[in-house]
Image (cartoon, coloured by chain):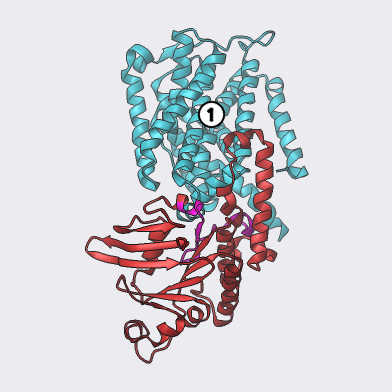
Amino acid sequence: MSAPLLRVEHLGMHFGGLKAVDDVDLDVPEGEITAVIGPNGAGKSTFFNVVSGFCTPTTGRVALNGVDVTGLAPHRIARLGVARTFQTTKLFPEAEVLDNVIIGRRQHTKSNVLDAILRTKRLRTEAAECRERARQALEFAGVLHLEALPVGSIPQEARKRVAIALALVAEPQLLLLDEPAAGINEEETSGLTALIRKVVESGIAVCLVEHKMRMVMDLSDRIVVLNQGKKIAEGTPEEIRGDPTVIDAYLGGSSHA
Amino acid sequence: MRLPPARGVALSLLLLTAILFPLLVDNPYLVSVVITAYVTAIAVYGLDVMLGYTGELSLAQGGFFGIGGYSAGILMATYEVSFWIALPAAVVMTAALGYVIGLAALRTRGDYFAIFTLAVGVMIVIIIERWEGVTGGTDGLIGIPPPSSIGPLRFDSLTAQYYLVLFFLVLTIYVVWSLVNSLVGRTFVAVRNSEELARAVGIDAGKTHQLSFVISAALAGLGGALYAVFLGYIGPAMGGVQMTFMMLVYLMIGGVASLAGPLVGTLLVTGLMQFLQAFAEYQMMALGPILVVVIIFFPKGLAGLAKLLPERWRR
């Protein structure tokens, strides 16, 4: 069997005495949605930061398609096909939607300062290509009609879609979504759920951190549960729903989120 | 990237005014003031590449201006190298030094970067002052000759020097314009807006900062070299911290991250300072309140105001 798209082994991220992530193993296979859930402070965001290269883990390794990428800089990991979104939707608010997304394609271009000053054919071709790809990504995310508006002026849900378009324009193999549905209502959440499903159907594996349990249960092929940095359970949505350890640690008895 | 027709016409008119200026104005003093403003503006464009588009304030800009000036000045006055070799050499030297300083300075960001580069700027002046054998110390360096002629083109008259400097200013504006409106400029702005997001989409933020800093230093070097050659004399003050802060004032008043800003600010403030020259050291007192007003009411400077007004009228 070939190596999974993403394999995380014995991953640990310690901040002084605090073990934000403690000896976590996790595989994200191609073409699937893997959700990482857990109560606040369980280490989910830290886990994402380590996988995307923003933190260098204290222990363990991260491998993409069997290649060790532990400790590589974020832009190197991004160029190996890992795209991510941020919990607080990070975008460039003053810039237009299309301009925001174009920059996501930069990693595939080679134009340098000389190309810019001499306005070479390469620069023009690449710029046009970035534009076209960005428009395709916006169309895929269902927000092409907003392309000319400043990001600061569009609704929250649209911004989340633009953030996903920005991640997709690089044509990643793996998309890490950090709480994509935070701060939007039920109806918008189901729209976003449909978009994420469409992303996976297009052949991109998704790893998702989310609090909205309905979304997680609807979408996920597999769920990994973290609590206080440790993996306490892993399985299909059905298995997780019935797991007493999980209910105890996270769902907390009768309080269904 | 094509200009809208109205802007094209406006730019042509502006360029025409700049070309006709020394022919229409029969005042050598005024012409030399404008030349000084032009060469300083070149360095201010460099400051804007780093501050306006990449989002880091470099307070070593005056220092780089001095290095450009001293490089060209020493080559020409001491070693009798031709201007046409000394000028590119000065630019390359300043850029190379910018690269080396950037390696250390760009380990910091924000306020720390500003303070670090301020210290670099101070060190550059101290070196210029103490390295007397080469730089002439506090006495400065005299006898920098005007550019040698190329065929029939002679550069010993004021008008000819005006056109020479204007050429390099237009070249600078073109370079900055084409950078800003390219994928390279987009990369700068992405790093300015959110370094974290830029890195997440595969941009090497460190390399981007380094590139911007080198371009910024190179433009300071170009401006400084032209300044030295035009004046024929340089002193350590040209590389001083006060020079840096004047450039920053020009940029703030003209407008950060706008193509017209550096030139507008430099011309306007230089003109104002000439006007207030009778008040000697008190002229700085007028500048303070103006700067405060501009920053509070027009945070994007006068160029930003020019963009804002038509929008208000349309409403």
Q: Which chain carries label 1?
A: B
The chain shown in cyan is which?
B
In the picture, residue A249 is in which quadrant? bottom left
Magenta stretch holds residue B82: no
Q: Residues within 10 Å of mark 1 (few under 14, many from 20)?
A: some
Indicate the secondary structure of the residue bearing disc 1: helix
Which quarter of the rendering shows the N terminus of chain B? top right
The chain shown in red is which?
A
In the picture, residue A55 is in which quadrant? bottom left
Q: What is the x, y in percent for residue B267?
A: 58, 33
Magenta stretch holds residue A90: yes
Side of B116 where B247 appears, left or right: right
Residue at left offset 68%, top offset 28%: B18
- Residue B73's place in the image compared with B275, above or below, is above
Residue A205 visible in the picture: yes
Identify residue for label 1.
Answer: B274
Between A213 and A6, the one lying in front of the other is A6
Q: What is the x, y in percent for residue B113?
A: 38, 42
- Residue B313's place in the image compared with B10, above or below, is below
Residue at left offset 58%, top offset 28%: B38
Between B27 and A118, the one lying in front of the other is A118
In the picture, residue A117 is in which quadrant? top right
Side of B312 where A177 appears, left or right: left
Q: Which amino acid does label 1 sit on?
A: Gln
**Residue closest to the far left:** A17
Q: What is the x, y in percent for residue A29?
A: 48, 67
- Residue B248's place in the image compared with A144, above or below, is above
Residue at left offset 52%, top offset 26%: B223
Which quarter of the rendering shows the C terminus of chain B? bottom right
Magenta highlight range = A77-100
